[in-house]
Image (tube, helix red, strand yellow):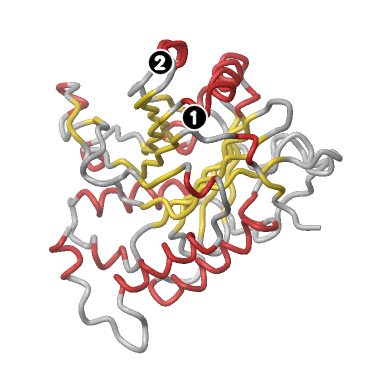
Amino acid sequence: EGGARGGVGGLLGDKPPPDLCDEEVLAAGRRHAYEPVAYAWADAGGLAHEFMVRGPFYMEDRVKVASEAAAMRVVAMHLYRCRADGSDGERIDHIAARGKCKKLVVELGRITAPHRERNEPCLFITNFQCPGSFTVNMVIIFALPCGYKKRWAAPGSPGFKFIKMFERYYSDLPVTPEPPPALGAPQELGTVPLDHFRNQRFKLVPRIVDGPWVVKSTVPSNKPALLGQKLTARHWRGECYVETDVHVGSNVVANNITGLCRGQATRIVMDMGICFEGRAEDELPETILGVCRFSNLNPENGVECIEN
């Protein structure tokens, strides 16, 4: 990593150095945090994480290896509840373009603009839409290092391969700055066929660090799941981000497991890893996109996304 950081010299103009830009991104995330949720998550994507990924020759030998540090850092994790009056519908789609979440995303776009092309995503946003007594939209914002294309320019390097996978993930997504209507939008809006790259490669890897036996025995720790094959996923793109919304309520089994975890959430410590599945030599070894650690997170602490 030190070598990569040292290779960004020569940036022209009055741009802030990439490392300073990275710190400004993290600071913006902290400014938009709210208590007590702010103390219930952390970025866990450093070299100490314990996720195994497909190795360089996995398609031949099926061997997994320890992943390098995650490509992206967690900037923010917010819980947004759907409003009780039903005006948000059963879930909030394209949440990065709405309310409080939009304010943070716009600020991150402004900070990172000097180090990327217009409409070039540097953020990956996941929105896990979890039903219950009220729907909680669990939003995690991951950020690439500022100037990542210069830092990871060496062909064949893990960073270079990750960039190519990321670009393939979003390349056919149109930039749609306005979100769909909360009520009455076609259910298929934002979806793609099961055999599309996004549904084939978006992978979640959970790891229960601590928690009740009933949760440990139910949640398959360290077992990857291609969510787009099991749950309805919707995808959106803005000026600086790609967003994937996962409708947990679209699958009975996932809904039941989530309901169990939601009831035990304040007793659970869990790492959630995101990865794009590699299936060819130029996509391997895999690199973890990012890892968010949840510690005794109370879903009841969700706030409304849209300000009155």
Is 24 positioned to the left or the right of 286 in the image?
Answer: right
Mark 1 Cα-neighbour bin, 10 Å: few <14, some 14–19, many ≥20: few
Report the disc number at residue 216: 2
Quadrant containing the N terminus is: bottom left
Report the disc number at residue 92: none
Residue for point 18% across, 63% down: 4
Q: Position of residue 96 (x, y in %)?
A: 61, 54
Residue bearing mark 1: 195
In front here: 294 or 187? 294
Amino acid found under the numbered disc labelled 2: Lys
Structural distance between the alpha carbons of marks 2 and 1? 31 Å
Q: Position of residue 171 (x, y in %)?
A: 47, 53
Amino acid found under the numbered disc labelled 1: Asp
Residue that sits furthest to the bottom in the current view: 13
Residue 288 visible within the image: yes
In front here: 153 or 299? 299
Q: Position of residue 111 (x, y in %)?
A: 46, 72
Q: Is residue 65 shown above or below 253?
A: below
Quarter of the rendering containing residue 223: top left
Quadrant containing the C terminus is: bottom right
Is 203 positioned to the left or the right of 247 in the image?
Answer: left
Q: Is residue 287 shown above or below 10?
A: above
Residue for point 45% across, 26% down: 268
Nearer the observer: mark 2 or 1; the answer is 2
Sequence order check: which comes first, mark 2 or mark 1? 1
In front here: 277 or 183? 183
Q: Is residue 294 shown above or below 34?
A: above
Task: Identify the secondary structure beneath mark 2.
Answer: helix
Task: Identify the secondary structure beneath mark 1.
Answer: loop
Q: Are marks 2 and 1 in contact (CB under 8 Å)?
A: no
Q: Is residue 159 shown above or below 263?
A: below
Q: Position of residue 54 (x, y in %)?
A: 24, 30
